[in-house]
Image (cartoon, rainbow, N blue to C red):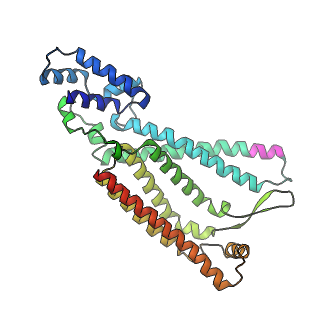
Amino acid sequence: MERINLYIYEVTRRLPEKLRADIEMELHSTILDMMPDDYTADDVDAVLTKLGNPAKLADQYREKPNYLIGPMLFDSYMSILKMVVPIALLVYVIVLTVQYVTGFTMDMPLYNSINDVIRNVITGSIEVLTQVFIWVTIIFVIIERTTDDGAKKSMQSKPWTPNDLKHIVPVEKKKRIAKTEVFFALLWVIIWATFYFKASDMIGIYEKTTHDQLQFVIPLFNRDVLLTLWPVVGALILFEIGLILYKWVIGKWTYKIAVWNMIYHIAFIIVTIVFVKQTGLFNVEFIRYTGKVFDIVSDAALLNWWNNIIWVFVAVSIIISVIDIFNGFRKAKI
């Protein structure tokens, strides 16, 4: 009976959650119907062998072919695409909206403005979709060909047998990596990555004009300094996205994931410290403007106040990273 339950588990875990309960009952009934009343372990193996590879059987229940990536990863691949595409498009539309709201003037013809918005939404969306598809596919190809949970399982050439079930261990609920966790992780990385590359054009001081329109007047960051750091930040972004997708594919916390999670956070802390220590990173005019808001007149006091804010931000980032590292190893140990 344990082998039957493992087989059913291997099939249903690849299916949408709304189908799992019904398919589990149906499959359990089908297997029992295919065996004699006083069945033996050999009878179980014979029936499971006849039913075949759980991944292929799950494909039949889904009624859609899985040919792009291996059957072990294809469902995760499509789920990630369905999750990332709306997030990326939403963030892009928000950024585009902010740019148009802050850049719009009454002198601009409304017809031309609408045409510009439509054209940029279409061309930008196509670019976003292309980038998402390319990078998600590349990362999944890497995962499939370099990990034990990828091609070594999904592309195996030997026929499936019931003996393969003895290696399957159902995932405990406390160790599972939930879909919501992956969703919000991807949402966060897409937001901060987008705003990093748009920071010098969006993050800063806005003031109302005579026409009651918002105008971007003082950026927080210096564009040139951000551009010099983009290769390092870009590598960190790809590392984080790869880790998130790998966590989704594996579906549970393991020591390997916990170690990679720790490496990411260490890299993030190092990059953050290097980032804030860059000379000229922050716009002097922005610092002076905020000093006036808080009635800080002295340049020395203003610089000290600003440095304190920055290092408090760094300290909070370190604390959050340490907590996440600890939780990763704790979940892997459960």
Residue beneath the point at 61% across and 78% down? 305
Tally of numbered discs: 0
- Give the quarter of the image for residue 50: top left
Dominant SS of magenta comes to helix
Residue at 33% across, 19% down: 26
Q: Is residue 161 visible?
A: no
- Does the magenta-highlighted stretch encompass residue 115? yes
Q: Residue at x 67, y 60 (%)?
A: 202
Indicate left or right for 227 with 35 as reference. Answer: right
Q: Position of residue 11 (x, y in %)?
A: 32, 29
- The percent position of residue 119, horizontal first and vertical second, equals 70, 43
Where is residue 78, by image quadrant? Answer: top left
Q: What stretch is highlighted in magenta?
A: 110-116
Asked if residue 159 is positioned above or below residue 91 in the image, the reply reads above
Considering only vertical position in the picture, is 236 above or below 311?
above
Percent position of residue 63, x then y: 41, 23
Would you place residue 235 above or below residue 121 in this image? below
Residue 298 on the magenta span: no
Choose between 275 and 123: the one closer to the eye. Answer: 275
Is residue 151 visible from the viewing direction of this image? yes
Task: Please state the horizontal and vertical placement of residue 1, each as a whole percent of the image.
Answer: 20, 26
Q: Residue at x 47, y 48 (%)?
A: 135
